Image (cartoon, rainbow, N blue to C red):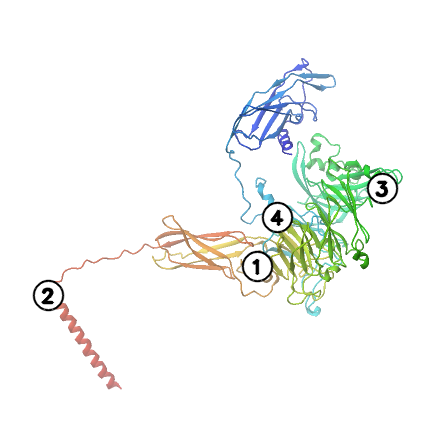
Amino acid sequence: MTSAIAIFLISSMAITIFALPNAFAQNTVTSYPFIDAIPNPCGVNQQVLINYGAINYLNGENDGWNVTITITKPDGTTETLTPPKTWSTGTAGITYVPDQLGTYYLQTIFPQQWYNASATNRVIYKASQSDKLALVVQQNKPDSYPWQPIPSEYWTRPADSQLQDWYTIMGSWLIPTPTNTNNLYAPYNAGPETAHVLWSQPVGDMMGGIAGGDTYKNGYETGDAYEGKWSGSIIISGVLYYNKYISGNPQQETVAVDLHTGKTLWSKTLTAYNITNLRIGFGQTVFWWSRNNRAAFSYLVCTTSGGGTGTGTTWIYFDPKTGNPQFNMTNVPSGTRYYGPNGEILLYSLVNYGNTTNRNYYLLQWNSSWVVTNGKTGMQESWGSQVLGTTYNASGTVARSSNLRGYDRNVSVPSMNVAGTTLPSTSFSRAFIGDKIIGTRANLNEINLWAISINPATMGTLLYNTSWTPPQEWRDGNVSVGTGMQSGFVSWSQESQVAVLWVRETRKSYGFNLNTGNYMWATEFSQAYQDAWDDSPTYSHIIDYNMYISASCGGTAYAYNISTGKLIWTYNATDPYTESYLGLNWWLMPVVVTEGKLYIGSMEHSVQEPKPRGAPFICLNATTGDEIWRINGAFRQTRWGGRGIIGDSIIATMDTYDQQVYAVGKGPASMTVTAPDIAAPFGTPVVIKGTIMDVSPGTTSDTMKLRFPNGVAAVSDANMSDWMLFVYKQFQQPTNIVGLPISIDAVDPNNNYVHLGDTTSDASGSFSLMVTPENSGKYTVYATFAGSGSYYAAYAQTALGVQEKPVPVVVEPQPASAVEQYFVPAVAGIIIAIIAVGAVLGILTIRKHK
């Protein structure tokens, strides 16, 4: 893989269209080989890019030179590499890792070889060799580009492509729930650590919340039962896309909202090629890698039956930035969509080209990228404008049908053509990309699993076809395994290579090894009876972090060891106020799994009115089941529509309590700090005070400005759930609010760092600290908040002046004269006598007055 990357890097620097001289003076010409190494010097055991080839270029894009590379190591031993043929530029590259200290010598050896410059001109290039290149290997690696850390402050899109490590927090959600087949696992996200809301807005086409008045306590519609609100919601590169109207509405509209700012980027009816009122089907990001073009391209994809001149399914691709149509594919074959390693969409099918007597089975792979690039060469291999330049017919559809054009693999499956090895069905249940397709059959007497390889090296090979006899209790109870919508295979994992079958009557699960097809285990713990009524078990059971997790109608989340089926932990979503009508717990459903966290929400099949209050949204430690945070009465999920999704480390979800869309994630905080404007007298205590406020996008709305004219205070993680209910849902203001820890520090007049003290903000966002500076002069004061699960770090700065310390006046004592020695005591005696007489006269006067 790395060698291929190096080859592309070299080719991208060269001219791609060449013309050899019209005529040669002779049939034998000189070759000019070269060699280079990057970096040089390098560190021991550091990967080095070796550029090699010959300056002589070739005429055909698939032509190249065959050369070898001789490497002489510091210990005198030699190594000969036979790298891939060069590109038509004459250049190529491979990677090499030197493991000795000292100087290596590299040389390209160009053997004599013929080249057909044209149909009538064959030229021989003479053997030669490049100059030897000295590659110095030292103990330490040379300096690399300065590392740019993961953001420690609130960030937005676009993020510069040089911030390469940010990819770890910039995941997208391309497959709408509930059709997501990836166990709700969302890598490349930092899962929200609290219920902190960034913004909210109406979902778009429904009145929200309680209706009031004559409707009593009842609320407006939720867009849930059989309505399917919020379905089709996806996230691409930090933008949330959702269908504004329910399915079947004659006026459809798609909304694009910036997840980081809450701003609506566009809202429009998606229309293309005479097809209108389209709805989002899924998203796609293709990372295209060709010899001249390497980049990612994202699309919104709408699906429709027919369209244009097509008779099958049509996929219409839209630019997510503008909502404008880009291209379409007609006659796309049916089947479950799977994403390949570069974002291409793959579909698989088993086809019998023979008949029932003379079978001739083939395994087919359809590739969405192949539809566009099949048959193209050179510059046409590029994506971008080359895709937009695809030939269209008069109706605007791709000129060649994609179901003929898109198949890039068509492999015989000889084992299916042999009597006795016929699979129970040619339809299969799941595909693991690069691994296998898996089929199942389940009934009271047999559980059958089979698998066929789709690994490119062994594609079409039957891996196993096994059967397991279920326990007698299945037959005794006539359980509904494999029938109806409440039992059957509910979860699959390529990472763990396990599939799980759920039986509603026994409320047990059964694990099967997907490497062998063999039965593994059955759970011993019978789940709550309410779980038997889950009509969407494939959405309630997931496999993540080598655990099988079930969360359903009974309101308890169960986590089982994926290898043994043993219970690891449970979590009860208790309802202390008995609002739920199902029991003591709330109906649960997994929503998102990322960064070791499991997010589960509450929903119901058909909403009750008035709605049960306090339905929770919960974040658990996925490996221990410990509660990280829980908010009661927010982010209530839908059963028939979509659930919460995550992208750019922000959860976006619709809440069926108020029909609002919420974005949940870590937000920005703003600080102020002040000190007395007048320099304080030395030794006098002064008060340093300030504020720390939540400045997330949602706090700037008109309603927030009316309710919080002085701003919304930023508060502690422990209080966040109750605080968000107060701020965004107008619940009663909590009385136990604790703010955020603030550190007050300074640089004193002597340029020394001084920690003045710590304080905590309150429910208004205010904080203060009284300090007594020890030095006179100017202090630079910093108020710092280190960050929390809810907010990024923040700081503010001010100045504090302290007056000079007063200089004490020292009076030297003088010896007394003889007169002073006599006069002073005499005067003192007189004064005392006067005071005594005055006191007596005063007493007499008072008596006379009385």
**Which amino acid lies under the numbered mark 2 shown in the image of this protein?**
Val
**Which residue lies under the disc numbered 1?**
720
Q: What residue does disc 4 label?
A: 189
First along the sequence among labels 2 and 3? 3
Numbered disc in front, either 2 or 3 = 3
Q: Earlier in the sequence, mark 4 or mark 1?
A: 4
Sequence-wise first label, 2 or 4: 4
Work out how far the residue at label 2 is from the one at label 3, CA to CA, in angstroms.
Answer: 141 Å
- The three-letter amino acid code for the residue at tag 4 is Asn
C-alpha span from label 1 to label 3:
63 Å
- Quadrant in which the C terminus is drawn: bottom left
Q: Which residue is mark 3?
A: 420
Q: Quadrant of the N terminus?
A: top right
Task: Identify the secondary structure beneath mark 4.
Answer: loop
Marks 4 and 3: which is nearer the front?
Answer: 3
Can residue 158 be seen here? The reply is no
Query: Which residue is label 2 attached to?
Result: 819
* Nearer the observer, 579 or 714: 579
Cα separation, mark 2 vs mark 4, equals 95 Å
